[in-house]
Amino acid sequence: MIQKSRSITHGALTSIPAGTVVTTIFVVETTGEGFVDLTREIKQFIHDAGAAEGLVTLFTRHTSASLTIQENADPSVLDDLLTALDRLAPQDGGWTHDTEGPDDMPAHIRTMLTSSSLQIPVAQGKLMLGTWQAIYLIEHRARPHRREIVAQFMGATR
């Protein structure tokens, strides 16, 4: 059922010339399956880029790790999300692709179900994340990996 909203409003429009692109690659050494909070590093990147208004794009250069924005207040949320992903793509799912081990195909499926890129607005030099939101790399493989995350700010600088 589609709900009708009682009211939808928006704030004042802002317009700025946006001619700057700043790019870096973060290298993340994971310890195996789980979430790695990247929020502090991305905030520092935005600061170092001199970002004022624009958009930051994050992209993982892998097919067995992904990116997400999730709650950062209660760690049990992340535990439950790992449980859900394991139920959706279990290691013992009868997969034919197992060249790199029994966790490889489930890792590919989990990446497909999540995301390889994120886009986050930047306003007044700050990421426009909600109060309880954080940016995470999700390592879907059991063993440690070296992951690369491309970060790119596009917009106006201070």
Image: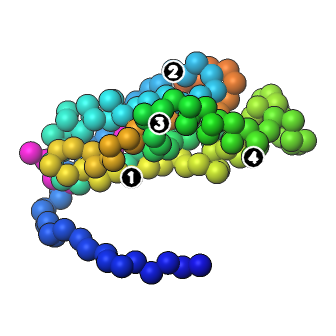
Question: What amino acid is labelled 3 in the image?
Answer: Tyr
Residue 136 shows which numbered tag?
Answer: 3
Circles 2, 1 touching at the beta carbon (< 8 Å): no
Instruction: Confirm whether residue 59 shows in the render.
Output: no
The N terminus - image quarter: bottom right
Circles 1, 4 touching at the beta carbon (< 8 Å): no
Closer to us: mark 2 or mark 4?
A: 4
Mark 2 crowd level (few <14, some 14–19, many ≥20, 10 Å Cα): few
Whether 81 is drawn above or below 54: the answer is above
Q: Earlier in the sequence, mark 2 or mark 4?
A: 2
Residue 88 shows which numbered tag?
Answer: 4
Q: What range of the chain is rendered magenta?
A: 151-158
Question: What amino acid is labelled 1 in the image?
Answer: Gln
Closer to us: mark 1 or mark 4?
A: 4
State the image coordinates of residue 70 (x, y, percent, origin top left).
Answer: 47, 42
Q: CA distance from mark 2 to mark 4?
A: 26 Å
Whether 128 is drawn above or below 29: the answer is below
Q: Earlier in the sequence, mark 1 or mark 4?
A: 4
Dot 2: element: strand
Q: Earlier in the sequence, mark 1 or mark 3?
A: 1
Give the residue at x 61% y 32%.
79
Q: Quadrant of residue 93?
A: top right
Circles 2, 4 touching at the beta carbon (< 8 Å): no
Q: Quadrant of residue 127?
A: top left
Residue at mark 1: 119
Residue at mark 2: 29
